[in-house]
Amino acid sequence: KCRYNIKHFYEVYDDEEEKIQRREMEIIHDMHTAIDKKQFTVFLQPKVNLYNEKACGAEALVRWIHPKKGMIPPNIFIPVFEKNGFIADLDYYMWEQVCILLRKWIDEGKKINPVSVNVSRISLYNPNLVHKLLKLINKYGIAPQYLHLEITESAYMTNPSMMLMIIEDLHKAGFTILMDDFGSGYSSLNALKDFPIDMLKIDMNFLPRGSMVERSRIIISSVIHMAKRLGIKVIMEGVETQEQRDFLRDLQCDYIQGYFYSKPIPVTEYEDKYINLMDF
Ligand code: C2E
Ligand code: MG
Ligand code: MG
Ligand code: MG
């Protein structure tokens, strides 16, 4: 006799499907007003320089504070926004919020470090990208080296030849380019070979865990070694333990980011902890 109750399985599956679809429709319904109602917020996660253990910048990560549902995590709504194109509006909103923040810190006489923003595939292939970014930083009087751009590895291969031109244009404009989630896709090495990026962020799934520790170590150390020979800086994401930190420091990884130092935190908390008055 069959061990699974097929009928029951489909009913459960239908229920799940329906729930996901309903949630997606609610997200689409609510997203249009969410920007105007200021429901999207910037959280900042510090990046730490492993040579001196000092915070050397941050990544801006979006949080949706929904009036009825509370905080919705990005992995719920970003995929929906990527499907319906709204991600371009959200990306632009986040970039502007970061520029406003950098301007505020400069006006307050604070010493500023670069903040990186995430650039989705749709924003990336918009022919106006460089123009939009330049207009934005000029509006707030921010030098391009303070806005780092995180581009997820999989976005590079959608249209490699166009991508190469986009990166060249971004470089000419003075922006720093970081390949996010390195190693998570199917053409990581091709992407590394073909695109003159400035920094590589190794996907957190490569961190030593469980029984595959030795394999993880070998892969991470090889990637760091390779990047160094290519003149590319390396940052490791998702560092949670002291062992992982020590291991990366031994390998001379340049920067790390992760819960070991700090979770992504609200701007005010970041300011209290990491933004110091410029010393005269
Ligand atoms: P990502 O850019 O690769 O960001 C890293 C994710 O890992 C963040 O999740 C961060 O909170 C999480 N993280 C950081 N340190 C640790 C750690 O030590 N352990 C673990 N387990 N996780 C850690 P988050 O904030 O939920 O964002 C998820 C993804 O959503 C991001 O991945 C990025 O792809 C996307 N995203 C977030 N904000 C934006 C945005 O403003 N625009 C776009 N286009 N995408 C965004
Ligand atoms: Mg990122
Ligand atoms: Mg990442
Ligand atoms: Mg990631």
Image (spheres, grey):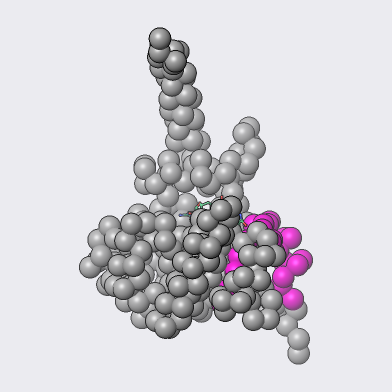
Which of these two is toward me, 216 or 198?
216
- In magenta, the rendered stretch is 254-276
Looking at the figure, which quarter contains the C terminus?
bottom right
Q: Position of residue 249 (x, y in %)?
A: 62, 75
Q: Nearer the viewer, residue 273 or 27?
A: 273
Residue 273, magenta (yes or no):
yes
Q: Is residue 187 left or right of residue 102?
A: left
Task: Work out whether residue 275 can be spotted.
Answer: yes
Name which quarter of the figure residue 114 lies in.
bottom right
Asked if residue 241 lies in the magenta stretch, the reply is no
Q: Is residue 107 visible?
A: no
Looking at the picture, does residue 243 appear above or below residue 184? below
How many marks can you see? 0
Compared to 7, does 85 lie above or below?
below
Residue drawn at x 36%, y 43% as measured from the top left = 83
- Quarter of the image for the N terminus: give it: top left
Residue 52 placement (x, y as % from top left): 68, 81
In the rendering, at what x and y percent does residue 85 appear? 37, 46
In x, y percent, where is residue 213? 56, 59
Quadrant of the rendered structure where residue 14 is? top left
Q: Point out the residue furthest to the bottom here.
A: 280
Residue drawn where x is 46% and y is 60% of the image: 181
At a point 59% along the width and 49% down the height, the residue shown is 63
Q: Is residue 206 above or below residue 178?
A: above
Q: Residue at x 75, y 67 (%)?
A: 273
Of residues 170 and 255, which is closer to you in this image? 255
